[in-house]
Amino acid sequence: MAKIILTGYMGSGKTLVSEILQHKTGWKLIDLDRYIEQRNDASLQQIFSEKGEVYFRKLEHEAFLEVLNSSGDLILSLGGGTPCYAGNHLLLNGDGRKSFFLQTSVGELAARLSKADNSARPLIKDKSIEELTEFIAKHLFDRNFYYRHATHTITTDGKSAEEIAGEILRLA
Ligand code: S3P
């Protein structure tokens, strides 16, 4: 029983890479954000605005534990902040788990996120392009400590999602 866990900042490509991995392995795919929404019958947007981020982090931790304890081979795409709260970084290894930090540069993340539809990303949805670069740089500085607990770090700049998925499968 194996679990491939993808982690990394918003916009690092977790969703696309996880879909390719699912296609290549035939394993079940869980996107933790969507799992939280289904489990709580509410959108992330609603959870953040009605109950706040601290409450979201509690739901996120519970959902992460639940998914890790489920049986069977699995591709798990985490939310951008998942490893950074509630000791979740300590759950990225062991018990058949291999985790992959998709490491993307600040410039690339800012370029991607400034073009993306961020309406479902409460932390950045109201930021201008100028604000975004500074926000990401500071945020990544704080978060890198947690991301680095992943079993492997995969740099993503200049690589296609297919190439990244291939690298992960060679290490998994
Ligand atoms: C968050 C990232 C989001 C989502 C929530 C919080 C974060 O996931 O979990 O908005 O703290 O970085 P994505 O990385 O899939 O956008």
Image (cartoon, helix red, strand yellow):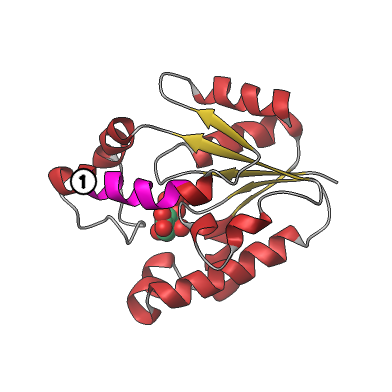
Furthest-right residue in this view: 1
Amino acid type, callout 1: Glu
Residue at point 37%, 67% (across, down):
45
Q: Give percent across and percent down for residue 37.
A: 52, 66
Q: Residue most toward the front?
A: 145
Q: Image point 33% across, 51% down: which residue?
A: 139
Which of these two is toward me, 38 or 63? 63
**Ligand 1 is in which quadrant of the figure?**
bottom left
Q: Is residue 155 above or below residue 7?
A: above
| Residue 44, above or below 22 | below
The quarter holding residue 109 reads top left
What residue is at 49 percent from the left and 70 percent from the top?
A: 57
Q: Name the chief secondary structure element in magenta.
A: helix
User: Label 1 crowding class (10 Å Cα cut-off): few <14, some 14-19, many 20+?
Assistant: few
Q: Name the residue under label 1.
A: 134
Q: Position of residue 128 (x, y in %)?
A: 15, 49
Q: Is the residue at mark 1 in contact range of ligand 1, meaning its CB lies under 8 Å from it?
A: no
In the drawing, does residue 130 fall left or right of residue 154?
left
Residue 136 covered by magenta stretch: yes
Range of residues picked out in magenta: 134-144
* Residue 11 position within the rendered picture, expressed as x and y whole percent measured from the top left: 39, 41
Q: In this view, does 100 lie to the left or right of 134?
A: right
Indicate the secondary structure of the residue bearing disc 1.
Answer: helix
Relative to residue 138, is residue 64 depicted above or below? below
- Where does the image place residue 97, in percent across and percent down from the top left? 74, 46
Q: Can residue 38 be seen in this view?
A: no
